[in-house]
Amino acid sequence: MKTLVIVTHPDIEKSIINKRWIEELAKYPEKYTVHQLYKVYPDGKINVAREQELMESYDKIVFQFPFYWFSSPPMLKQWL
């Protein structure tokens, strides 16, 4: 059973911990699929049908994002 990890970090290259975590997850493609919203949708236009299909194809989903003033990044708010 694979896990979908939805990563929503607006500048992943500057994030030491999140970037490293993604690198580690990539070592286990049979267990984890990393889905980076800011890389998939750089223009901010989310393909809702694609995202719904993706969500339905996994039993476990993990959301990883920086916590901004008791909230989430704009892309994750839009995605939700």
Image (tube, rainbow, N blue to C red):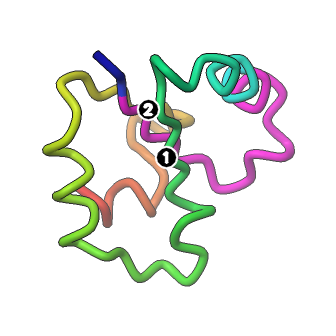
Residue drawn where x is 52% and y is 37% of the image:
34
Query: Which residues lie in the magenta part?
Result: 4-20
Tell me if residue 24 is in the magenta stretch: no
Where in the figure is residue 35, as x and y percent of width and height?
A: 49, 46
In magenta segment, residue 9: yes
Looking at the rendered structure, the kind of residue marked 1 is His
Q: Marks 1 and 2, how far apart in space?
A: 6 Å
Residue 42 x, y percent position in the rendering: 60, 75
Q: Pointer 2: what residue? A: 5
Would you say the residues marked 1 and 2 are in contact, meaning their CB atoms lie under 8 Å apart? yes
Quadrant of the image for the C terminus? bottom left
The residue wearing badge 1 is 35
Residue 17 screen position, x and y as percent: 76, 22
Most foreground residue, 52 or 19:
52
Q: Is residue 73 above or below residue 22?
A: below
Residue 71 falls left or right of residue 19: left
